Amino acid sequence: MQSLLGSEHVFALGIDPGLSRCGYGAVRSDRGRLEPVVYGHLATSPGEAVATRLATLWDDLESLLEDVRPDVVVVERVLFQANARTAMSVGQASGLALAAAARRGLPVVQYSPNEVKLAVTGYGSATKEQVQAMVAALLGLAERPAPADRADALALAVTHLSSAAVTALAGVGKAPGAGKAGVGKAGVGKAPGAAKAGVGRAAGEPGPATARASRA
């Protein structure tokens, strides 16, 4: 894990877990520059049985990891929610993402929603709209990623990569907490030419894992 964080080239896949919509966003860090590669979301039908939906999401996550082949998977940490039903479905989706990554031997990192907001916007209570706007600005996207699940997934990847950049600059093996790794401090800024990075493929790539994204 230490060698990965200290690498000049890191490819991170952020996953915002959810059973109805599971956002994903892949971002590459090339010598401190962030380059968006692909983003979208996986969807399951609320009309199907939970077991069937989980099986569908598992297959899609497996296909996503096979197509994207990230160096590290960044999953949002599930925190307590007032809506127990929502918390359960998010927890189930999160467990599938963690298991799918572990099955492939991929490092897994988790950040809480507040840590991500603080790292990306500098404000731990930022709104979803503010996160979407900052993600678009940092990655040089022509439009804000929507729905919010996509922006959150990209923000997870950005959070980890900015944390890795700070670690590399500091020469420390262990990554500091995301709350201390604000993107502005990481000197990452906007990725040159990011708008040409093929992000328009978000709803159509990679392969079968994103087939539902365009229909969701």
Image (cartoon, rainbow, N blue to C red):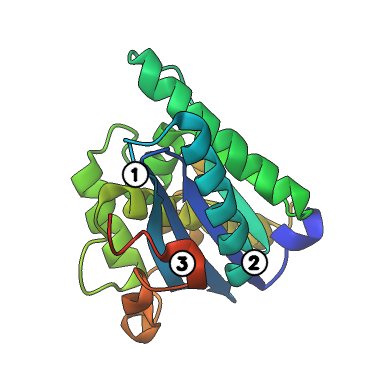
Residue 63 seen in the figure: yes
Q: Position of residue 161 (x, y in %)?
A: 55, 59
Residue in the image at 27% along x and 65% along y: 137
Left or right of 88? Residue 150 is: left
Q: Position of residue 200 (x, y in %)?
A: 31, 77
Q: Is residue 55 above or below residue 134?
A: above
92 vs 52, nearest the viewer: 52
Location of residue 36 by image quarter: bottom left
- Between disc 3 and disc 2, the foreground one is 2
Q: Position of residue 68 (x, y in %)?
A: 58, 69
Cα distance, mark 3 to mark 2?
28 Å
Q: Position of residue 91 (x, y in %)?
A: 51, 28
Residue 179 seen in the figure: no
Cα distance, mark 3 to mark 1?
14 Å
Residue in the image at 34% along x and 43% along y: 45
List the residue tagged with mark 2: 66
Left or right of 137? Residue 64 is: right
Please name the amino acid that badge 3 sits on. Val
List the residue tagged with mark 3: 188
Q: Earlier in the sequence, mark 3 or mark 2?
A: 2
Please name the amino acid that badge 2 sits on. Glu
Helix, strand or loop for disc 2: helix
Helix, strand or loop for disc 1: loop
Q: Earlier in the sequence, mark 3 or mark 1?
A: 1
Please name the amino acid that badge 1 sits on. Gly
Mark 3 Cα-neighbour bin, 10 Å: few <14, some 14–19, many ≥20: many
List the residue tagged with mark 1: 122
